Image (cartoon, rainbow, N blue to C red):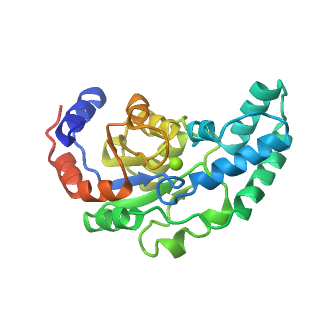
Amino acid sequence: MTIEQAIEGYKKYSGAKSLDAIVALIDMDGVLYDSMKNHTRAWVKLMKKNGIRCTRDEFYLYEGMTGVDTIKMKFREGAGKQVTDDEARALYRVKTRYFSELGEAPVMPGAVRVLEVLGTLGVERIVVTGSAQTSILDRLDADFPGLLSEKRVTALDSARGKPNPEPYLKGMAKAAATASQCIVIENAPLGVQAGHAAGCFTIGVTTGPVPERDLYKAGADIVYPSMDALADALPTLISSLRNARPA
Ligand code: MG
């Protein structure tokens, strides 16, 4: 997929009259932080302790769902058990503890460059995550000083997790921007689905085991193999979006 093909495709299905690309709505886990390894380890530990069979790889596919929804689904499918909201929240606190015990997840290679390049292009950078993990949310300002907007969407802002478009719609509202003024940067199929359903030009980045084709299937307009590759492509991509003629 070339940049030109991706933009042509987006214009056709969205009917967007202009593509300003003035706001980037950026997922956190697997995009800004190389944190999915620890998340999937913590999930498997929680499930095993509760006698629910699972693999680490499947949790890469659930990424973007809220923790409570993931727990309810796995207990229902894996143990035929209906978990109440309170029980799910208690289990999520245990998962959160396991995640913290694994230590600090590193900043994703290339993430700082992506944010810097977006900044030089005049693009506002807003984190949109379904996460409620304070151990990682609290690090954003220290790890990306001056590179992120204070506007932020977390699990506290959006009751419905990805693939529901709500988190990205909230991000657009906070930015006071329309879908065609925003780009979404995502690593997970459900996150890509959410960005696409919100109507934004959605960029997939394959930073984990989920292959490129799964992100395209989920609705990605274009996919890059790493955040560094995205940083390299961004100046051309953003200027091509801004120069695209209306459909
Ligand atoms: Mg992610």
Does the image show residue 177? yes
Quarter in which the C terminus is drawn: top left
Does the image show residue 22? no
Count of labels in the image: 0
The quarter holding residue 220 reads top left
**In the image, is residue 27 above or below residue 220?**
below
Residue at image coords 24%, 54%: 233
Q: Where is residue 62 in the image (x, y as percent from the top left)?
A: 60, 37
Horizontally, is 201 left or right of 82 in the view? left
Residue at image coords 22%, 50%: 237
Q: Position of residue 9 (x, y in %)?
A: 24, 31
**In the image, is residue 138 above or below residue 212?**
below
Q: Where is residue 151 in the image (x, y as percent from the top left)?
A: 50, 61
Horizontally, is 40 left or right of 106 in the view? right
Residue at image coords 31%, 62%: 118
**In the image, is residue 143 above or below residue 237?**
below
Task: Say which of 117 and 37 sits in front.
Answer: 37
The quarter holding residue 244 reads top left
Quarter in which the N terminus is drawn: top left
Task: Say which of 52 and 94 sits in front.
Answer: 52
Horizontally, is 150 left or right of 131 in the view? left
Q: Where is residue 192 in the image (x, y as percent from the top left)?
A: 45, 38
